[in-house]
Amino acid sequence: MEKRESEVKDLVEKLQRGVLTPEEAKKLLKERGLMEQESWKWRVSYLIFWVAYFILCILPFPLKGQLPRISFPLVVLYGSLIPSVIGIFLTLWATYSHRKKGGLKESGDTIIFHRDGPYGFMRHPGIFCWIIWFIFIPIIISNHFPFTFLSIIGIILAVGYHYYMAYVEEKTNLLKWGNEYGQYMKEIPRFNFIKGLWNLRKRR
């Protein structure tokens, strides 16, 4: 871990001195195996997940017309818009924080460890927002695309897959930043933003 940690620090120093461009730093991170989400295996698995989720939750194929349909009252349909909008806000906030502080000037990958914005109370705000959308979008559109037990399976698949994504991302971040990120994991919850906000309040 120490070797990986020093490699990242070296890249950060070169980036800050202008010896490396963000594009070059990103290429080196990929060569050192510190960008799991850029691998072809991850891309293929994410494509397979999207296809499976789309078929289970959205695609109105004939079988879904023969299955018992779960209906939601209007208060649930409109209420589902609230977490979805919050998810959009959190995504924009996390994107801004990564672009401003992450060193690579992009929304996903980072080379500089930071705890700005939503990362001050939740380790994975971006993944959390995706989970929110995958849960509530099938409910919101259920008047047009039948919500059945297949939709529930799709939602469980989405939650499980993105939980795994968070786990893989944490393993990569531990290689990037070592003990600093390990301490961060002890202080900041993975998805429990209520606990995270409470801890943030106590620290202040």
Image (spheres, rainbow, N blue to C red):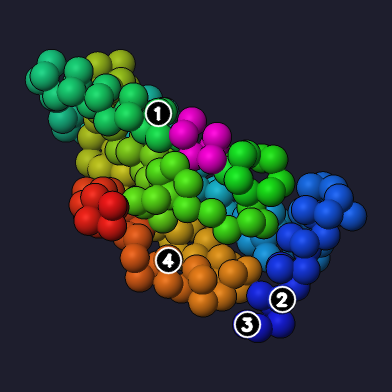
Residue of label 3: 1
Is the residue under label 3 in contact with that under label 2 (CB below 8 Å)?
Answer: no
Q: Which mark is residue 72?
A: none
Real-space Cα separation, disc 4 to disc 1, in angstroms: 23 Å
Q: Amino acid at mark 1?
A: Phe
Q: Earlier in the sequence, mark 1 or mark 2?
A: 2
**Residue 14 position by quadrant:** bottom right
Residue of label 4: 184
The nearer-to-camera label among 2 and 3 is 2
Real-space Cα separation, disc 4 to disc 3, in angstroms: 16 Å
Is the residue under label 2 in contact with that under label 1 (CB below 8 Å)?
Answer: no
State which quarter of the image contains the N terminus: bottom right
Q: Tag 3's secondary structure?
A: loop
Based on the picture, tell me whether residue 103 belongs to the magenta stretch. no
Q: Is residue 65 visible?
A: no
State the image coordinates of residue 31 (x, y, percent, origin top left).
Answer: 80, 65
Q: Amino acid at mark 2?
A: Ser
Q: Main secondary structure of the magenta part?
A: helix
Q: Residues within 10 Å of mark 3 (few under 14, many from 20)?
A: few
Residue of label 2: 6
State the image coordinates of residue 63 (x, y, percent, origin top left).
Answer: 32, 33
Residue of label 1: 89
Q: Tag 1's secondary structure?
A: helix
The nearer-to-camera label among 4 and 1 is 4
